[in-house]
Amino acid sequence: MDAINWSELSFGYMKTDYNVRCYYRDGKWGELEVSSSELLTIHIAATCLHYGQEAFEGLKAFRGKDGQVRVFRMDENGKRLQASSRGIVMAEFPVEKFEEAVRKVVKLNERFVPPYGSGASLYIRPLLIGLGAQVGVAPASEYMFLVFVTPVGPYFKSGFKPAPVCIMRGYDRAAPLGTGTIKVGGNYAASLVAGRKAQENGYAAVLYLDPKEKKYLDECGPANFFGIKDNSYITPGSNSILPSITNKSLQQLAKDMGLNVERRSIEVEELATLEEAAECGTAAVITPISQIDDLDEHKSYVFSKDGKPGPICEKLYNKLKSIQCGDEPDPYGWVTILQ
Ligand SMILES: *Cc1c(COP(=O)(O)O)cnc(C)c1O
């Protein structure tokens, strides 16, 4: 293998040595299998291809100053994959087996875990798909769990910098009582048109409004939204957004920094009163928002004029990153050190 230039990595796919797979057949999960192939051979009538029986996860492993590899909150990802499976009637993959598969795939690909200080990390992508052949609309009887890894660069090539987002009422990513709370590919397919339109107009993401009333803030592209005002961390309470593990972690850190944490409906107009705004998720941890343009109402809410993130966003970002790579103690037991 050619030496990897860790500091030049993008957030993209790179082939690694192994992936780990597990099949559900005859009503039970089999043993974990190791594969060195990047390909799958599946039935042409598999339900994942036709009826969207597909859920995925995303988490990261980091190398610390001590050389050890740390995985962040994988039990939470395991539980969320189960929730996604229930949401689209797929067999649930046991959480202990999920953790074993993650440990195994990271260990097998340890040479791809970027060095400490490079800003890069190992992205871990678990996937669960319906494999059984079905032409009538019904859940499959066979499933496959798969986890692969790929090293990814720092999300912000040019440093931790605020980006603009937009509101467009003509699009939803999920229905009011639909699949917005689970991590399924269908939500992503539904967001591609609006996402491309936003990008063509220079925005990093679409800030969706609640799909029922179009009155409240909802999901921010593939990430959760939060704002800061009057010493409070405020994040939307909604029936159509994904429970982000990053958001959950930031809420804990905010509380311990002495902020109030509010999870509630946030009206669009309340944006005018926020001191800081940001989106959060595994990929970027926090992406501060420089301004939000409400394209239908021809209104702008500006949070950063100087290209710098707000002080609370920056503090939260640094704190979470330090815990993830082991620079700071982990009082919450969020990190698993791989032996
Ligand atoms: C994965 C995802 C997030 C972020 O969740 P994390 O657990 O923080 O990575 C937020 N919103 C959507 C729609 C997602 O799919």
Image: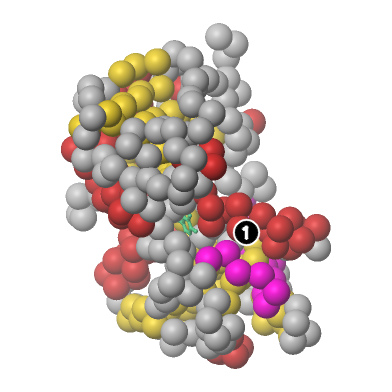
Which quarter of the figure is the N terminus placed in? Answer: top right
Q: Residue at x 60, y 52 (%)?
A: 189
Residue 247 pos. (x, y %): 39, 63
Residue 15 pos. (x, y %): 54, 21
In this rendering, the answer to whether 193 lies above or below 72 is below
The residue where tag 1 is placed is 191
Q: What kind of secondary structure does the magenta stretch mostly adopt?
A: loop
Looking at this rendering, what residue extends furthest in the top direction?
Answer: 1
Of 277 and 136, the residue lying toward us: 136
Q: Residue at x 67, y 48 (%)?
A: 158
Circle 1 residues within 10 Å: few <14, some 14–19, many ≥20 = some
Q: Is residue 49 visible?
A: yes
In this rendering, the answer to whether 27 lies above or below 190 is above
Q: Quadrant of ligand 1?
A: bottom left
Region rendered in magenta: 159-174
Q: Secondary structure at mark 1?
A: helix
Looking at this rendering, what residue extends furthest in the front direction?
Answer: 136
Of 106 and 168, the residue lying toward us: 168
Q: Is residue 160 visible?
A: no
Which quarter of the figure is the C terminus placed in? Answer: top left
